[in-house]
Amino acid sequence: MFYETKDDHGLPRDPFKACIVPRPIAWVSTVSAEGVRNLAPFSFFNGVAHPPPMVILSFNGKQPQGNDKDTLANIEQTGEFVVNVVSEALTDPMNVSCAPVAPEVDEFTLAGLETEPSRLIAPPRVKASPIAMECTLHQVVELPVAGPGTRNALIIGNVVGIHIDESVLTGGLVDVAKLRPLARLGYMDYTVVRDSFTLLRPKE
């Protein structure tokens, strides 16, 4: 089949996200200007540069109360955020943390998660997360929107510090079989990366 994205695709659900898989999940912790902690997962996320190490996050639409998503508002106000990696063991608390709750609700408490302080920035990290990246805001890029009353913003962040739990290292390398990161597929589907293979680049 083929369809122009400006037209109806004719399928039961929009297939776009299912065509870009798997997508890593950024479990983003922030703190508001008033000091309220926030934690939320995002799958429009990836690394985009190295060196220096940089990441992107994308925020679409509005919260039910009509404001920007709490994570986006906090990053714009404070310029800081932590990307926590979601391992398979953290699937349930990750899902709890994406509930559409009021800005004053602390998702760490809601999901029953312990925190650890960051070294270089104010937002805490998820203690149980095997990898956490401390980030500062580099740039906000406004993207086209699908309709009135919505916002589509791309955050570009500088990774200023990385925490890696020794339990996911083998011979000094991050071992994906130990890390078992959760990834987003299309619709409401997820997967876990449990194995990998090495493929060397061709020599000139």
Image (cartoon, helix red, strand yellow):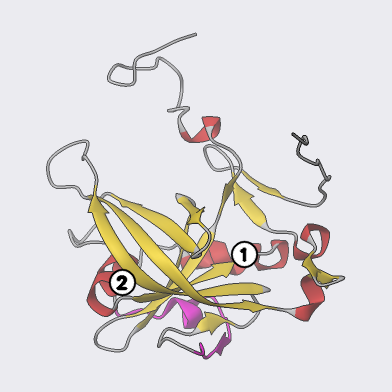
User: In the current view of this chain or complex, which residue is farthest to the right?
Assistant: 171
Query: Splitting the image into 4 quarters, where does residue 198 fall?
Result: top right
Q: CA distance from mark 2 to mark 1?
A: 20 Å
In the structure shown, which secondary structural element does the residue marked by tag 1 occupy?
loop
Q: What residue do we see at 40% from left, 56% from top? A: 57
In the structure shown, which secondary structural element does the residue marked by tag 2 occupy?
helix
Any magenta on residue 106?
yes
- Is 188 drawn above or below residue 3 in the view shown? below
Query: Splitting the image into 4 quarters, where does residue 32 fall?
Result: bottom left
User: In the current view of this chain or complex, which residue is farthest to the left?
Assistant: 148
Magenta residues (range): 104-119
Question: Which residue in the structure is indicated by mark 1?
Answer: 86
Percent position of residue 85, x then y? 60, 66
Q: What residue do we see at 50% from left, 8% from top? A: 1
User: In the current view of this chain or complex, which residue is farthest to the front?
Assistant: 204
Q: Who is closer to the viewer here, 84 or 63?
A: 84
- Residue 140 appears anywhere in the view: yes
Q: Which mark is residue 100?
A: none
Q: Who is closer to the viewer here, 161 or 108?
A: 161
Q: Who is closer to the viewer here, 112 or 54?
A: 54
Task: Categorize mark 2 by other alpha carbons within 10 Å: few (<14), some (14-19), many (20+).
Answer: many
What amino acid type is highlighted by mark number 2?
Ile
Question: Which residue in the structure is indicated by mark 2?
Answer: 75
Magenta region's main secondary structure? loop
What amino acid type is highlighted by mark number 1?
Val
Percent position of residue 179, x then y? 75, 64
Q: Quadrant of the C terminus?
A: top right
